[in-house]
Image: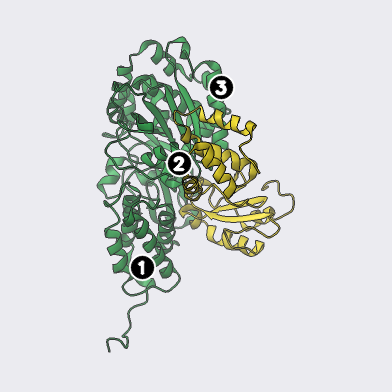
Chain colours: A green, B yellow
Amino acid sequence: MEKLISRFFEIPNANTISVYLGEGGYEAARQALEEMKPEKIEAELKNSNLRGLGGAGFSCGMKWSFVPRNTGKPIYLVVNADEGEPGTFKDKYILTYAPHLLIEGMILTAYAVGIHKAFIYIRGEYEVPYLKLKEAVDEAYNKGFLGKNIFGTSFHFDVVIHRGAGAYICGEETGLLESLEGKKGFPRLKPPFPAVVGLFGCPTVINNVETLSYIPFIVKRGSEWFAKLGVGKNGGMRLFSVSGHVEKPGVYELPMGIPLREIICDHAGGIRNNRKLKAVVPGGLSAAILTADELDVRMDFDSLKAIGSMGGSGGVIVMDETVSMVDALCVTMQFFAHESCGQCSPCREGTGWISRILNRIVNGKGRPNDIENLLDIGKYLGGTTICALADGAQMAFLSYLKKFRSEFEAVIPKHTKSYANA
Amino acid sequence: MKIFTTEFRKRADQICANYPVKRAAALPVMRLIQEEYGSISGEAELEIADYFEIPPAAVRELMTFYTLFYSKPKGKCHIQICRTLSCALLGAGELIRYMEEKLGIKAGETTQDEQFSLDQVECLGACEMAPMAQINKEYVGPLTKEKLGQVLKHNYVGIQD
């Protein structure tokens, strides 16, 4: 199967501009700036069915089309490189091994939408990816691919790398904008959407690293070709990050709609130690968990949504038969409780309550009404908050209780006859 | 101690020039201070507030909201073990307990001689290396107790296979 982005992970020194140019790099951007109308690029993108690969899966072309062009204000491009959804590590590979692909995608985006300034918000813990990205941006400036008169045209475009400081919520696009403005990353109420009122109050395009990195391929080889690689309205391929109890954890670039079973068994080498598979998180920690009976699901946004889960960030976490689902959920909810930004009560309190109750249960101190209590808290977690963190926490949380309820019941002591109601 | 010397102010001004609004440079400037001093003290917070012309409470907000800002310096060797799902599935919990025992401190603490700090952190985006840790600036994994044991040796330079 042909590899697109991940081909560069295997080419030595593809992070350098000389090797990238030798592989046909920047040809799409040069050709577009010299010969294509910006509207043509936008139309191509719409037809390609490229979806937002950071997690939301929103049509990338549609997102661009919401940006007003004649407000008199600058339009900004913000690159979401704050990869933080547990189970996801693919953007790290792009930033480290193929940073010029991202830069080329950014140039094409900037040209298509009429953008002259971009900020790349990269998660604070990423050291090597940051250094590689910085080298690449400097190289691109030196070659005249960034800055003034790009490729000798009148187009100008500047890029600033902005390092985060440790906060999952800053991967949420409006939390990211707040953080980029020098504030704590409290997500904003929508509408207005960032496309209209985004960074510094200006129209803003925000896209994930991987999403932007596919754009050079689409411009070079056409939207029809790209759309056909995928399935339905899920164009192209995506990078699946596979981890957990598999033989070969890693990043696998595969077409949208590939069955989950193939990713795990054929590409990631199956389950370690000849054990049986028990459960899989298909799209980052926020996605509803799947059981071994659901392995034939197709891994595109629409198919996963249809079975009550989500494609999310493409982070596939595989669990074998030895895993206690109570423990796994406890770790999961600890994460959400830690990362809830604290702005909305249902999320701040709800994730904390759930995490504390689960902690008590795994320590052998479960109470007979815990499951009912958990379900009651879980009910109000989603749809009641400013951003989707709580929605994700709810989706994951309820799926464990629904699909593995007996495991929870087994570790909670049964109510014995008490003196109180004797 | 004065952080915003004329020289430092110049560097901070340069960072600010990247943004149309000065305050947007708060995180990068704070990172720079921490990089040089190892932590951001209460006095430093006041200087930052002064430089950005924002209330000290706004700086304290950034200090407490973001996990990478420290009000006290970390030990010479800072071990941050990931505890989120992929790492937990492959034994992160046991590694954290092992290090707590070896160092005689709880996660979140620093040894008395200030040589080691141990933290358990949420997903670092390296689940393919699970169970993994960030030791100072480096990502290391998959970890075992033996490999982590090497970290405890004097003049730690990195984990060897």
Q: What number is the disc on residue B57?
A: none
Chain to which the residue tagged by mark 2 belongs? A
Q: Amino acid at mark 1?
A: Phe
Q: Which residue is mark 1?
A: A408
Judging from the image, what secondary structure is the residue with disc 2 in? loop
Q: What number is the disc on residue A139?
A: 3
- Callout 2: 10 Å neighbours few (<14), some, many (20+)? many
Residue at (66, 44) in percent of width and height:
B1
Residue at mark 3 to residue at mark 1: CA–CA distance: 55 Å
Q: Which residue is mark 2?
A: A83
- Callout 3: 10 Å neighbours few (<14), some, many (20+)? some
Chain to which the residue tagged by mark 3 belongs? A
Residue at (74, 53) in percent of width and height:
B154
Which residue is at the front of the view, A135 or B71?
Answer: B71
- Regarding residue B55, the answer to whether it shows in the image is yes
User: What is the quadrant of residue B4 in the picture?
Assistant: top right
**Tag nearer the camera, 3 or 1:** 3
Q: Amino acid at mark 2?
A: Glu
Residue at mark 2 to residue at mark 1: CA–CA distance: 32 Å
Q: Amino acid at mark 3?
A: Glu
- Callout 1: 10 Å neighbours few (<14), some, many (20+)? many
User: What is the quadrant of residue B34 in the picture?
Assistant: top right
